[in-house]
Image (tube, rainbow, N blue to C red):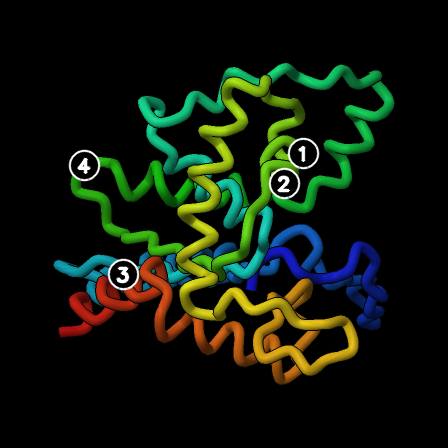
Amino acid sequence: MTNRFPVFSPAAKIKGYGHYMDAGAIDNSGLLGNLDVYNYINRTNNTIFKGKKAVFVDIINSKTLYLKYIIDNISPNKFDKTLKDESEKDNLEVNITTALDYNKIPTYLENFFKNWEEQKNSPIIHLPIYLPHKISREDVEGFLGGTYEDQYVEQLIQILKEENDKILAITGTKETGFTSAWKYYEPTLSRHMGESSYDYMKAMIHKHEHLLTQFSEIEKMLN
């Protein structure tokens, strides 16, 4: 899964080689490792992929990256996301925010594979599969670093409602009390694997249109 490990991981010492650390906070998608294997195979045996395309399936459970996916797919004719009033930040805050942005590498890799796939006679297919999350206006404004005037807010809220309703149609809209058992609980971390979070993921896999579309694409490639 992409981008779901802690900021600090314990370093492992390998005698004679040095210290190594889990870089899951930087990139935990496995794409870099798969790319290394792909390049190695092509260097050592260039007949395996002859006449075939290598398919890189990227499983992503990050809410931030799902939010980016939703924003990127909003038609400019439907809503112009550039009309925000950008929030002013001092230089220190900008540098710290940039340094702590875990999504830099996953976003770069996504763009890298997307551009590679779009090249003429590309040898690869990149297929991202996102775990759907409910997105709020505050989520969007926080991600884009600005706020929208009232005249645009209604448009944004309607677009987000359409996306959120796809999730609510699966999980239901009945509110659950804090002390009550939750049938579906949107996971905050991949390590939070309670029964309700498991049921949420399972329901999305079997019923959400984004995942069903991507699974259908994979099945076509296998047949």
Q: Disc 3 on helix, strand or loop?
A: helix
Residue pointed to by mark 2: 139
Residue at mark 2 to residue at mark 3: CA–CA distance: 25 Å
CB under 8 Å between callouts 3 and 4? no
Tag 2: residue type?
Answer: Asp
**Callout 2–callout 1 Cβ contact below 8 Å:** yes
Closer to us: mark 2 or mark 3?
A: 2
Q: Residue at x 66, y 60 (%)?
A: 4
Q: Residues within 10 Å of mark 2 (few under 14, many from 20)?
A: some
> Closer to the N terminus: mark 3 or mark 1?
1
Q: Position of residue 131 (x, y in %)?
A: 49, 61
Identify the residue at horizontal 43%, vertical 49% (top origin). 163
- In primary-sequence order, the first of circles 3 and 4 is 4
Q: Nearer the viewer, residue 198 or 134?
A: 134
Q: Amino acid at mark 3?
A: Thr
Category of crowding for the residue at label 1, using alpha-carbon neighbours closer than 10 angstroms: few (below 14), some (14–19), many (at least 20): few
Badge 4: how crowded within 10 Å, few (<14), some, or many (20+)?
few
Going from the N terminus, do you reach mark 2 or mark 4 first?
Answer: 4
Q: Which mark is residue 213?
A: 3
Q: Which residue is mark 4?
A: 120
